[in-house]
Amino acid sequence: MEILNVKDLKIEFNLSGHRKLHAVNGVSFSLNKGETLALVGESGSGKTTTALSLMKLLPDNGSIVEGEILYKNQSVINASAEKIRSLRWKEISIIFQGAMNALNPVLTIEKQLMDVIMHHDHLEENEARIRAEELLKMVEIDVTRLKQYPHQFSGGMRQRVMIAMALACNPKIVIGDEPTTALDVMVQAQIFDLLERLKKVLELSMIIITHDLSILGDTCDKVAVMYAGEIVEYGEVQDIYCHPKHPYTQKLLSSYPVIGGKKALPESIPGIPMDMTQIPVGCKFAPRCHKAMPICFEEAPIQKVENGHRYFCHLGGESL
Ligand SMILES: Nc1ncnc2c1ncn2[C@@H]1O[C@H](COP(=O)(O)OP(=O)(O)OP(=O)(O)O)[C@@H](O)[C@H]1O
Ligand code: SF4
Ligand SMILES: [Mg+2]
């Protein structure tokens, strides 16, 4: 059952001197109950902006200028302030990018969890304390650690606390914005295992944002690859891994080492990300694309669809 549908979303940021930065340019995707979608792409491609818009949490200078976001078939964009308050954290919640480093160093983990619970769920102190214990158990941390401070927790444990906070109000969708960045590979795997278990037990849907396609493994069902504010390729995880059609996805997949695989060295993607204040004609990836042809600099590619696998490229989709 579909619970989220994003259609042709466009988001701009106002900059000084009446300039506009086109952060998200026509993004469409959907999410079913119990499904995990990965939003993948390099820095600045619009992943966080897309995620924040789902909860109407864009910074003041950002606005949705076109498109639609439907949560359970109801418009998020046109929802009243009251509706949005009941959507945030209770229906859709987010583990913010880098938030584990923003825990308050002078408050215990218990206090910080209780503050979140009391703020959003309006529970009494005693009830909030019981809920904080439940949440800590859920993220597999011993409840005796509730009285400790963030500096007594490892990075992985602090990230578990952030996951607990995101789960505080029983949301249906959890967004993890780079939930394992800055953690070592073993801890990354543990956090993904935990998210997978929680997803099953709590019947959650998830959106996982990452730079790194290689860490998604068995966690995701669908992948949306973003470049310069657009989803350039979208499909089932197996199709994206085994038959990537877009040259950017192909490069992204080869830019990470394959353990035990045939590639000795990861490849880099030449060039620099696009200046998002100037939208060029043609394909946005053309200046960096190893397969670019003259038409790529003149005409934007139209979408091609093969069994639900979508991509924007003038080429027919030669695989790696
Ligand atoms: N408040 C803002 N004002 C102006 N530009 C912004 C603002 N927030 C983001 N941007 C710009 O919007 C674009 C998309 O940013 P966003 O943070 O969504 O990218 P991202 O894919 O999440 O990158 P990263 O992987 O580095 O987190 C970037 O060009 C960024 O500089
Ligand atoms: S349209 Fe052209 S430039 Fe763009 S990704 Fe395809 S081949 Fe490369
Ligand atoms: Mg981001």
Image (cartoon, helix red, strand yellow):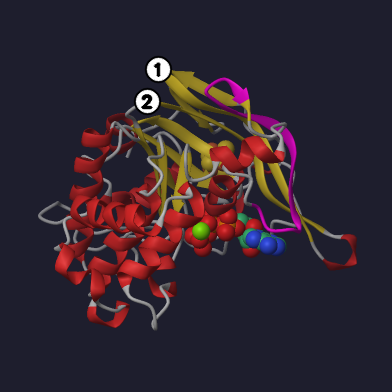
Q: Are marks 1 and 2 in contact (CB under 8 Å)?
A: yes
Which amino acid type is shown beneath numbered disc 2?
Answer: Lys
Residue holding disc 2: 33
Q: How crowded is mark 1: few (under 14 residues within 10 Å), some or many (20 or more)?
A: few
How much space separates mark 1 and mark 2, taking CA atoms? Answer: 6 Å
* Residues in magenta, as a range: 58-74
Of residue 52 and residue 136, the one placed in the foreground of this image is: 136
Q: Can residue 19 be seen in this view?
A: yes
Of residue 138 and residue 219, the one placed in the foreground of this image is: 138
Residue 78 lies left or right of residue 149; in this view the side is: right
Name which residue lies at 71% across and 35% down. 80
**Rendered image: mark on residue 307:** none
Residue holding disc 1: 1
Q: For mark 2, give the secondary structure.
A: loop
Name which residue lies at 89% across and 60% down. 18
* Residue 109 quadrant: bottom left
